[in-house]
Amino acid sequence: MMNQTPRRCNVFRLPTAHPADTSALSALIANGTVAAGSIRAILGKTEGNGCVNDFTRAYAVTALQAALAEPLGCSPAEVGQLIAMVMSGGTEGGLSPHLIVFTATNAPPDAVPAFSLAIGTASTRPFRPEEIGRTAQIEATAQAVTTAMRAAGIARPADVHYVQVKCPLLTSERAAEAASRGHPVVTADSYKSMGYSRGASALGVACALGEVGRDALDDGAICRRLDLWSGRASTSAGIELMHNEIIVLGNSDQWASDAVIGHRVMRDAIDLPAAVGALADVGLPTAGQLDDAARHRLLAVLAKADPSTSGSIRGARHIMLDDSDINATRHARALVGGVLAGVMGRTDLFVSGGAEHQGPDGGGPIAVIAQRSAPHAK
Amino acid sequence: MMNQTPRRCNVFRLPTAHPADTSALSALIANGTVAAGSIRAILGKTEGNGCVNDFTRAYAVTALQAALAEPLGCSPAEVGQLIAMVMSGGTEGGLSPHLIVFTATNAPPDAVPAFSLAIGTASTRPFRPEEIGRTAQIEATAQAVTTAMRAAGIARPADVHYVQVKCPLLTSERAAEAASRGHPVVTADSYKSMGYSRGASALGVACALGEVGRDALDDGAICRRLDLWSGRASTSAGIELMHNEIIVLGNSDQWASDAVIGHRVMRDAIDLPAAVGALADVGLPTAGQLDDAARHRLLAVLAKADPSTSGSIRGARHIMLDDSDINATRHARALVGGVLAGVMGRTDLFVSGGAEHQGPDGGGPIAVIAQRSAPHAK
Amino acid sequence: MMNQTPRRCNVFRLPTAHPADTSALSALIANGTVAAGSIRAILGKTEGNGCVNDFTRAYAVTALQAALAEPLGCSPAEVGQLIAMVMSGGTEGGLSPHLIVFTATNAPPDAVPAFSLAIGTASTRPFRPEEIGRTAQIEATAQAVTTAMRAAGIARPADVHYVQVKCPLLTSERAAEAASRGHPVVTADSYKSMGYSRGASALGVACALGEVGRDALDDGAICRRLDLWSGRASTSAGIELMHNEIIVLGNSDQWASDAVIGHRVMRDAIDLPAAVGALADVGLPTAGQLDDAARHRLLAVLAKADPSTSGSIRGARHIMLDDSDINATRHARALVGGVLAGVMGRTDLFVSGGAEHQGPDGGGPIAVIAQRSAPHAK
Amino acid sequence: MMNQTPRRCNVFRLPTAHPADTSALSALIANGTVAAGSIRAILGKTEGNGCVNDFTRAYAVTALQAALAEPLGCSPAEVGQLIAMVMSGGTEGGLSPHLIVFTATNAPPDAVPAFSLAIGTASTRPFRPEEIGRTAQIEATAQAVTTAMRAAGIARPADVHYVQVKCPLLTSERAAEAASRGHPVVTADSYKSMGYSRGASALGVACALGEVGRDALDDGAICRRLDLWSGRASTSAGIELMHNEIIVLGNSDQWASDAVIGHRVMRDAIDLPAAVGALADVGLPTAGQLDDAARHRLLAVLAKADPSTSGSIRGARHIMLDDSDINATRHARALVGGVLAGVMGRTDLFVSGGAEHQGPDGGGPIAVIAQRSAPHAK
């Protein structure tokens, strides 16, 4: 994709007072800071349980679609086709509910292209139920990641630092439909199908980025070969779609802004040095906690959290997997949220659960987006 | 208290496989590392909810008393009179259940007194129900802290770094008994009485250590004047006693070991620099996370956690106080546990909730005990 | 109110697949069974926790308003002014999420007036924050109940069997506004203010129906004199309004249908005979469980549930108030839902919590609506 | 087993103030009502979550063993070999924590044998890990049930009304040990192994009682053929044993008391008629709720509860299986507890979860023990 005029990707991190609170975004649109048509993606942390019966995610999407319909001049349902929205439930510990809005515009005429934040999106074809959680989903996802990289103007996989995937899940109706055609699905359990779909999608990202060789992968590897993973994938399953939506974030010299993205992989849930490394990569070195100036230059933190299946962290027992009162992923988000809040000095962090094939067992990718220089009036 | 032969305070941090697991302690007694009679105090993190119906605390105490009865040559009930035991429920996030055993022995004949870890214990008289959560409890606690300091050979309040208090609570029977004598109690609600008792006890510590002037305190200040607090108190309420038990930890030149204690006050739940400072105070400076050598020299971490009543952390909303599925103190422990695990590189941290008058609103004291030199065979 | 042409109140109980599921109602409108303009009130059980952070209630209202806007030819926000909607969160145990839609139409020309189900609605003036949870709210509610009775064509209080009230709560902003005018509010705690508002509203119903004498009531009685209560009030607090909305259900000879309503008061949570009595009152006597024919004639069951403050039921301890993992009201709804499901043979029951002054401590009103004769095509 | 002198089985239902409360039992022993040596079995409901991390069960057993050691003149550990103890966690809704103590003594010299309550116990051999959850466990359990019937003096399977089984579960250590010998276990997941062990044990009961033909059963049927079940089994898995312990309750003419047991099978969770039928079987007919006289003659209620895997009850959706905040079995116990409390007029009911092959999907057995005549001084 040849793009002579540089583009600019802006990032807006907006607090919410409740899951349906879109007031901060509406205010930015009203005062002209954000053109509704420039919005490419919205990631959000909502305060539900992040598990099966978390309706705060759909509620937030409903509210965002309602709020953006008029500015975009379309129906609420059509908003969903224009803007990728991924809501992650669960703000355990001190995590703060918020939205992260990504826009893409032409850079001002005098802007000089810089190696800076780039965004690209793509979708796969719709999957048949029996393809979900299997190699067909891996392959289609890998192709779509490549397409999204092209859309973002990113040529080298090394310049990709975060790939958000929204993927489908299986319902009993979908499983029955496949069975009626003689094709059994990977699992009849809706909850488990989310893990398979997230896992296959993450492996698709890993293939596209060269982190895992395609020939290492077959159906049996998905959700079993935990040693195969992407250090940049973040995948999330939802009932409302049958295809995969891809958002690629990286750095590219076809864009022009002072924002830049970097990432590292946390090898376990308390791998603070990985977070410190990611900050250093984007020009925010720290010994301890970011100072006030630095933390205001931090535009977004995107991380994955999951309990280690070993039942321990560096040899010490954790109780996440044995707690029948609080779901294990809730513990894990609270923990990783605390580790990151300590170094960042902020709690509005996008920490999400369900990390199959997204980083090593018990660990996960962490990406940070920062402004190279101190913020000023745009 | 003149003590010509230096004493030695040893600290043993022992993992548990479940709340009643005393096998690690029994093994140390069996192999002669610990003389049962030298045990002064046992602090423990158990994996219950840390709230009203957390029976893991009493279960752990029952198991410890049963395990120590034979070595001590007494009944299980008498063990409770010989050794102060404070169990704190709640290992949310990645916190790891464990026991911290404190022993006091004579130092070896060749030991040179050093300014090192010292322990002293004391008790108040039993309280009448109407005294709990009021100035009478403050005053008796302050006196007992002074007594425990003397027992520890600590003259200066500045050398005290951690004061654990176990204090009573009110039951409907206790409230009724007081009422029958014409003396209303501070609250008829058992759960609230725990807060008042913890708060008055913490203010007693603050008085003894000169952190708060006695004339600033009256009944009305307790649990209301949140600006008055101790930076070294950690108080815990239990149904099984009517007096306050005090454990003072500090440094004294009447003792001889290479262990030393320090503390700082976290001004909010994500005050990582306070933790870094406390580590530096005990000879473990770090930029990021303790390395393997340093984290093995860390003997214990003792911290308090509570949600800020403002509903936010550095301006960002938290949802702890509005979550009807997970108690607010459980969120707070998970958060502070994550912040501290990040820098310590360990998860076996004694993070407890219920921080009335123990540090500023939303923050709390953090104490660390470390070996000055690398561990070696004792 | 003279009403020569008899009216007809129809009741539609509709299952939902999730909190935003309005498909059953939309289908009834599409096939002409329900005229959108005839809908007077919608009660709903949603599957949230029914406590502070239950967003399923607002999500359901949002979905209903969106679904009804087009049929009513108005905006979603205006739907809220035309139709009273009260969503109750919490379907613990076996309770089944559902909507109950009440319509009022002119009866067919050949309809003979019968002493049958009648509905009337009314609103109070908006309250100032300092009036909430105090006698001003009682008085205005009592007046509005009288107005709604008139609208329903019900003259005698004895013919009123259920009064649903939606009432406001206090937020910190509202409390601050009142304080700025020199008027302290009843409590600064939002959660507690819900109880005071529900309690004052229920006492307003009790006054209007002659269940409690007005002179027995002053500010101090609210949420304290638990011996004063209405056996027909069901009140619910919400943040979105500052006035009280009233829905009165009873029987009147100005209406013409084969539906009829009755009620009893459960003296404790397991007072099955009260439910059996209410069923008998509406022509559904049973010894055990309603048979299939009878349970299909049951149109709606509306009950209140709350844990007894004594901590016991008929002398046996319950653990609802001591459980820090599951909110007490969730236990109570599950319990009362089970008691009622046993006799009704159905689980789509409107059992709601928060029963201040709505029946005796630990008990609550139960109302049932039934068809006198077996259902047939309407 | 010829038993010329009739025996007597007494049942004592004792409230507990907390999981370790044995005071009521100790009082009965102290005043001579119960001889410690006559205690055959103790069933208990404790107030934990009834799931993986419920330590109230072990805590209660620890307390009972400590309390009975002195009266029995043995060590606490030996008490566990003399008396079968089965603690069931979870008193959701209004269920009241309590103990049910079964004693067997010689009847008084003048006692006339009656067809009355009989108890018998037996154990299987220890299982190898790979036998758990498989046909070997079915067969050994069936044999032991037959042995326990003989011990109880019950010849006909139709006279058996309740069979409590305590069975082992798999841990990672046990699974590894089996694997090291080349024998894979049924599942490496501890939680799932509980279901397999309960299921195989229940099928063993079904075989012994002729409810299921032995030839219908192979390994593949366990936890899959939900149409195969016992209407009298209640099985519970625990980590502390490797064999199955069996308690058979029924009626026999070799015993002499006025207590009698009966049972029915609830076809779903709200099958009140089954409970009414079981009450009628033991001489307590009721139309509605037991009156005071009748409910005092009710000695024990023993029932199983589990959510229906269909996700609905009589066609109406339940949310038990989708709730990530409250475990499904907790909902189910609350529901069945409510249904039964309504008809019984009592809340101290032994309702336990985990009903694999114990009654039909979503339903379960209910047994009741009652005195034929009104209680009088024994």
Image (cartoon, coloured by chain):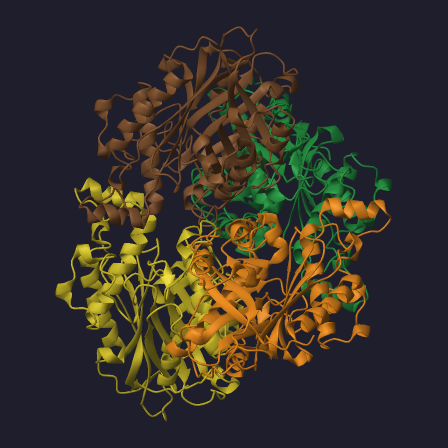
Chain colours: A green, B brown, C yellow, D orange
Please identify the quarter of the rendering in which residue C74 is found. bottom left
**Residue C299, x across and y down, in percent:** 44, 79
Quadrant of the drawing holding the N terminus of chain B: top left
The residue most toward the front is D109
Of C145 and D87, nearer the camera is D87
Residue drawn at x 47%, y 84% is: D285
Q: How far from the left and from the top, in percent, is residue B327?
A: 45, 45
Tally the marks. 0
x%, y% of residue C260? 36, 83
The residue sitting at the left extreme is C215
* Closer to the camera in the image, C210 or B121: B121
Residue at 33%, 33% (x, y): give it.
B199
Where is the C terminus of chain B found, in terms of image quarters?
Answer: top right
**Is there any visible trace of residue A47 in the rendered image?**
yes
Determine which quarter of the picture holds residue C86. Answer: bottom left
Q: Position of residue A173 (x, y in %)?
A: 68, 65
Residue closest to the eye, A366 or B105: B105
C95 is higher (above) or lower (below) than B18: below
Examine the rendered structure and indicate whether residue C16 appears above or below residue D19: below
Q: Is residue D82 left or right of residue C133?
A: right
Examine the rendering and report whether any part of residue C95 can be seen: no
From what the image shows, is residue D235 above or below residue D265? above
Q: In percent of the image, x 63 and y 52: which residue is there?
A: A238
